[in-house]
Image: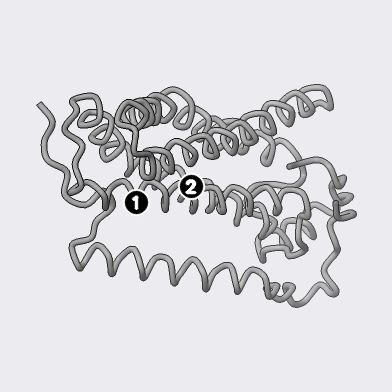
Amino acid sequence: MSSQTPMPPDRTTPPRMPRWVKVFGIILFLLAIVVIAMHLTGNNLGGHIPHMP
Amino acid sequence: MTSSIRKFVRTAHITFTVGWLGAVVGFLALAITGLTSQDAPTVRAAYIAMELITRFVLVPLSFIPLLLTGPLLSLGTPWGLFRHYWILAKLVINLLSTLILLLHLQPIGYLAYIAADGTLSSTDIRLQVQMVVAASAALLALLLATGLAVYKPRGMTPYGWRKQYEEHSAPPSADAST
């Protein structure tokens, strides 16, 4: 596990966003694009499900 | 939050999240069995069991850490809910995993219904494959969330950075949150 929470380097500027957060955000964005594309092309989650009696 | 309450909430949080992970593995095993087995009673049992696991295990185990133990643990300790990127990332992963699970309730119910009815056919293959893909994705997401909780990668949000200077307090201990 990591040690204590690091203090920011100075008081005037907030710390930079870490690289792993940017990668995480890009992956999330790409996943959202895929889901939206699937939705627009009619391949919704679950596809076409007939009504159950 | 006192130390004993924090330990209790942390124990509950770990128990529920690990249980959620285990339930997803079980769901994946049933989804693969339903897709690949040639034995009709086995396929039927797999999809009926999938629906039961979803309703009585997966849904409760996903909601409790997301809505109760996770926020309690974050807000009740100096870690906060929006101060560190790894906690935010875990929150997003859990939110999306629960949302996708809820979106799959109807397809899972449909598969269980047609399996019990004996009308499962080759036209349902797409739905059967989707169950395997969704369970695999959920497993990866939960493993990622577990990794984030253990490694706690560095990175403070602008909000967390501002609050830390405002409070002028000591930084939190390393194991205050999971």
Query: Residue B95's mark?
Result: 2
Q: Residue B10's quadrant in the figure?
A: top right
Residue sticking out furthest to the front:
B38
**In-front residue for pair B165/B46:** B46
User: Which residue is denoted by mark 1 in the rendering?
Assistant: B129
Q: Chain of mark 2?
A: B
Amino acid type of the residue that numbered disc 2 sits on in the rendered structure: Leu
- Say which label, 1 or 2, has the lower sequence index: 2
The N terminus of chain B lies in quadrant: top right
Residue neighbourhood size for the residue with mark 1, other residues' Cα within 10 Å, grouped as few (<14), some (14–19), many (≥20): some
Colour scheme employed for the rendering of this structure: one colour
B25 to the left or right of B11: left
Q: Element under label 1? A: helix
| Circle nearer the viewer, 1 or 2 | 1
Image position, residue B145 (x, y; %): 63, 50
**In-front residue for pair A35/B127:** B127
Vertical comparison of B99 with B17: above or below: below
Query: Residue B60's mark?
Result: none
Image position, residue B78 (x, y; %): 77, 44
Q: Are marks 1 and 2 on the same chain?
A: yes
Image position, residue B107 (x, y; %): 27, 40
Amino acid type of the residue that numbered disc 1 sits on in the rendered structure: Val
Q: Chain of mark 1?
A: B
